């Protein structure tokens, strides 16, 4: 197994209401799940292959709860990546070189039945975790925007966090509001739903704990 490590920032937006039951071991509140994910890799490597500065994205859909499988996925890799970097990122994103079920990539990959061919092109992604703002554009394929949740009475920003000490994706996530649209090869759309902003620190063995 080739050892890898990624440290970066994430925005994920699914069709659940704010909070997302899945974060607490529950079931999706719409029956099925659809989600868009973007990550900016600030530091990273797969063996001797440097992955720092690259972006990745993905679109997911499951007809029921994620653990029941039958999922569909499309993965997008930054066009700036070399062939070695592309292969490394796709290996990580599909659960390769990873302890069984140790990361969100490995868990999700185990539930995918229809994996579209990976696409390489512009992955324009910017996210500020603490401000709960983010923007993803994969031209011709995916759009996602994130912003703070707003108080419906006075419009003030609402700040909430989820802390998962034993999670397989993050330790702490800032919760906001997301809106996404996927055009190809998958079509989906949802708005003003669960947005997750997090600093990710993952390696071949799972979440790298801070303490």
Image (tube, rainbow, N blue to C red):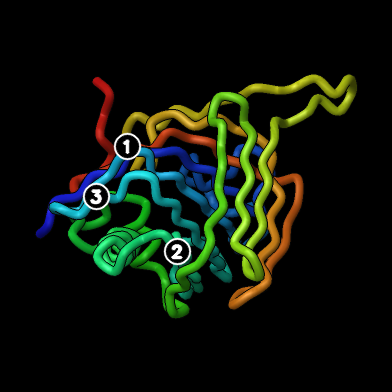
Question: Which quadrant of the rendered structure holds the C terminus?
Answer: top left
As displayed, is residue 101 above or below residue 177?
below
Picture quadrant where residue 127 is located: top right
Q: Residue at x 73, y 57 (%)?
A: 190
Q: Secondary structure at mark 1?
A: strand
Foreground mark, 1 or 3, reads 3
Disc 1 versus disc 3: distance between alpha carbons? 15 Å
Residue in the foreground of this view, choosing between 63 and 95: 95
- Cα separation, mark 1 vs mark 2, equals 23 Å
Give how far across and how far down residue 72 sits, in percent. Answer: 50, 73
Residue at the spot of label 3? 50
Q: Name the residue beneath numbered marker 1.
A: 201
- Residue depicted at x 70% and y 31%: 148
Q: Which residue occupies the foreground of this view, 64 or 79? A: 79
**Residue at the spot of label 2:** 79
Q: Is residue 1 left or right of residue 120?
A: left
| Residue beneath the point at 45% across and 44% down | 40
Tell me residue 115's x, y (percent): 43, 77
Q: Which image quarter holds the N terminus?
A: bottom left
Q: In the image as oriented, which residue stretches furthest toward the left?
A: 1
**Mark nearer the N terminus (3 vs 2):** 3
Q: Where in the figure is residue 133, as x and y percent of width and height? A: 64, 34
**Residue at the spot 45% in from the left edge and 38% down from the top edge:** 9
**Label 1: few (<14), some (14–19) or many (≥20) C-alpha neighbours in 10 Å:** many
Question: Few, some or many C-alpha atoms within 10 Å of disc 2 (few <14, some 14-19, many ≥20)?
Answer: some
- Number of other residues with Cα within 10 Å of mark 3, as a class: few under 14, some 14 to 19, many 20 or more: some
What's the CA distance linking mark 3 and mark 2?
15 Å
Mark nearest the camera among 1 and 2 is 2
Helix, strand or loop at label 3? It is strand
* Cβ atoms under marks 1 and 2 closer than 8 Å: no
The image quarter in which residue 149 lies: top right
Element marked by disc 2: loop
């Amino acid at each position: 197994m080739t050892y890898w490590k990624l440290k970066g920032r994430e925005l994920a937006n699914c069709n659940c209401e704010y909070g997302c039951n899945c974060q607490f071991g529950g079931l999706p509140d719409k029956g099925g799940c659809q989600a868009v994910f973007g990550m900016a890799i600030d530091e990273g490597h797969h063996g001797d292959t440097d992955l720092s500065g690259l972006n990745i994205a993905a679109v997911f859909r499951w007809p029921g709860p994620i653990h029941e499988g039958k999922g569909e996925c499309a993965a997008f890799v930054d066009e700036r990546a070399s062939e070695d970097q592309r292969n490394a990122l796709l290996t990580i994103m599909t659960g390769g070189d990873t302890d069984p079920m140790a990361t969100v990539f490995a868990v999700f990959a185990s539930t995918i039945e229809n994996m579209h061919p990976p696409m390489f092109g512009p992955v324009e992604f910017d996210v500020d975790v603490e401000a709960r703002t983010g923007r993803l554009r994969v031209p011709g394929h995916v759009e996602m925007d994130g912003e703070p949740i707003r108080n419906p009475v006075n419009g003030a920003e609402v700040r909430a966090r989820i802390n998962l000490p034993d999670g397989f994706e993050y330790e702490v996530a800032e919760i906001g509001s997301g809106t996404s649209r996927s055009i190809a090869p998958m079509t989906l759309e949802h708005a003003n739903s669960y947005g997750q902003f997090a600093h990710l620190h993952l390696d071949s063995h799972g979440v790298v704990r801070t303490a």
